[in-house]
Image (tube, rainbow, N blue to C red):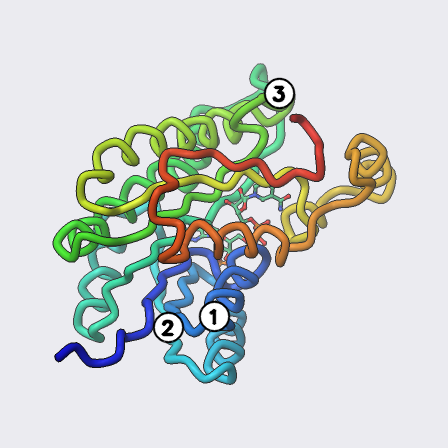
C-alpha cells in the first residue's frame, strides 16, 4: 500500500532576496520543502528559510557560487547528504550588467555569461539525473524579456538570457521522455534590488512604456513559476512565458 505522497522538494537559486525569495515563499505556501540558495547574502537567505519554516515546511539554506562547477557539485553533494535532492529546480540567480558593447570588457562579458547562462547549465546538469531516475521533475529557468527582444546597453545580459531561453528549449526536448519539464519565465521589469539601481527619472520613463503602467511585484513572477512547477503542469514543456505587463510583447 502506498503511504501519503511526500512533499515536493524545491531548490531555488538566488533566493536570498528579490524574485528568488518570493518564489521560495510561494512554493512553501503550497507545502513544498525549500532549499534557499545564496552566494553572499547569508542573513537574507536565513530570513527567507525561516519565513518558509513558519509556513510549516522543511527549509534550509545552501551556499554556492554558481559560476563554479566545483561549488555546484559541492552543493549537490550537500543536498544529497541531507536527503534533499530537488524535484523542482528554479534557476533564478542572475545579475544584470550595463554598458555599450563598444566599452564592454571581455572579463565583464565572461562574468555575465558565467552567472546567467553557465550557472543554469551547471545546476541543471547537477540535479536533472535524480529527476530522470524518478521519472518526474520540474526545471524552471528565469530569463528575461531582454533575452527575446534584446536591450541596447545590456548586450551581454541579453545574450546570456537569450542563451537561457535556447537552453530551455533544447533541454526540454532531452528531458521530456523522462517526465521532466523544462520551461522559462521571462520577466519584464520587476521591483527588486536589480531595478532599484534605476534613478527616479528612469523608473518613471520605464513605467510609461509598460502597458500595465507599473513594474511587476516579485510575487507575480513567483505565481507563474509555481504554476509551471506544479505536478498538474505535466504536459507544458519547452515554453518561454513572458510576464511583463504587456511590455515588449
Ligand atoms: P536580485 O534581487 O539582484 O537577486 C539576485 C540573486 O542572485 C541574489 O539572491 C544573489 O545571491 C544571486 N546571485 C548573484 N550572483 C551570484 C553568484 N555568482 N552565484 C550565485 N548566486 C548569485 O535580482 P532579481 O531582480 O530578484 O532577479 C532574479 C532573476 O530574475 C535574475 O535571473 C534576473 O536576471 C531575472 N530578471 C529580473 C528582472 C528585474 O527587473 N528585477 C527582470 C527580468 C529578469 P546573493 O545575494 O547571495 O549574492
- Residue in the picture at 34% in, 57% down: 88
Disc 1/disc 2 C-alpha distance (Å): 9 Å
Q: Is residue 61 left or right of residue 149?
A: left
Q: Going from the N terminus, do you reach mark 3 or mark 1 first?
A: 1
For label 1, the residue is: 30
Q: Is residue 244 left or right of residue 186?
A: right
Disc 3/disc 2 C-alpha distance (Å): 42 Å
Specify whether tag 3 is near ligand 1 (CB below 8 Å): no
- Residue in the picture at 62% in, 31% down: 98
- Residue in the picture at 48% in, 45% down: 94
Q: Residue furthest top?
A: 102
For label 2, the residue is: 33
Disc 3/disc 1 C-alpha distance (Å): 42 Å
For label 3, the residue is: 100
Q: Are marks 1 and 2 in contact (CB under 8 Å)?
A: no
- Assign a secondary structure to mark 3: loop
Q: Is residue 1 left or right of residue 226?
A: left
- Residue in the picture at 52% in, 43% down: 95
Mark 3, mark 1: which one is toward the viewer? 1
Instruction: Please provide percent x and percent y for residue 119.
Output: 35, 43
Amino acid at each position: 500500500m502506498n503511504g501519503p505522497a511526500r512533499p515536493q522538494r524545491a531548490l531555488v537559486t538566488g533566493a536570498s532576496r528579490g524574485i528568488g525569495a518570493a518564489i521560495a515563499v510561494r512554493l512553501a505556501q503550497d507545502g513544498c520543502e525549500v532549499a534557499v540558495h545564496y552566494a553572499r547574502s547569508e542573513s537574507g537567505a536565513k530570513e527567507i528559510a525561516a519565513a518558509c519554516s513558519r509556513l510549516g515546511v522543511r527549509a534550509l539554506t545552501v551556499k554556492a557560487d554558481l559560476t563554479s562547477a566545483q561549488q555546484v557539485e559541492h552543493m549537490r553533494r550537500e543536498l544529497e547528504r541531507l536527503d534533499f535532492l530537488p524535484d523542482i529546480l528554479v534557476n533564478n540567480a542572475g545579475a544584470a550588467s550595463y554598458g555599450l558593447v563598444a566599452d564592454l570588457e571581455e572579463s565583464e562579458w565572461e562574468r555575465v555569461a558565467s552567472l546567467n547562462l553557465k550557472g543554469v547549465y551547471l545546476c541543471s546538469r547537477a540535479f536533472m539525473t535524480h529527476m530522470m531516475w524518478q521519472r518526474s521533475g520540474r526545471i524552471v529557468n528565469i530569463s528575461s524579456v531582454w533575452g527575446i527582444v534584446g536591450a541596447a546597453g545590456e548586450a551581454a545580459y541579453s545574450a546570456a538570457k537569450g542563451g537561457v531561453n535556447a537552453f530551455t528549449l533544447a533541454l526540454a526536448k532531452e528531458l521530456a521522455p523522462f517526465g521532466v519539464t523544462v520551461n522559462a519565465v521571462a520577466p519584464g521589469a520587476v521591483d527588486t534590488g536589480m531595478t532599484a539601481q534605476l534613478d527616479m527619472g528612469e523608473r518613471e520613463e520605464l513605467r510609461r512604456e509598460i502597458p500595465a503602467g507599473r513594474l511587476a511585484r516579485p510575487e507575480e513572477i513567483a505565481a507563474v513559476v509555481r504554476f509551471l512547477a506544479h505536478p498538474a503542469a505535466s504536459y507544458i514543456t519547452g515554453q518561454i512565458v513572458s510576464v511583463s505587463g504587456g511590455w515588449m510583447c
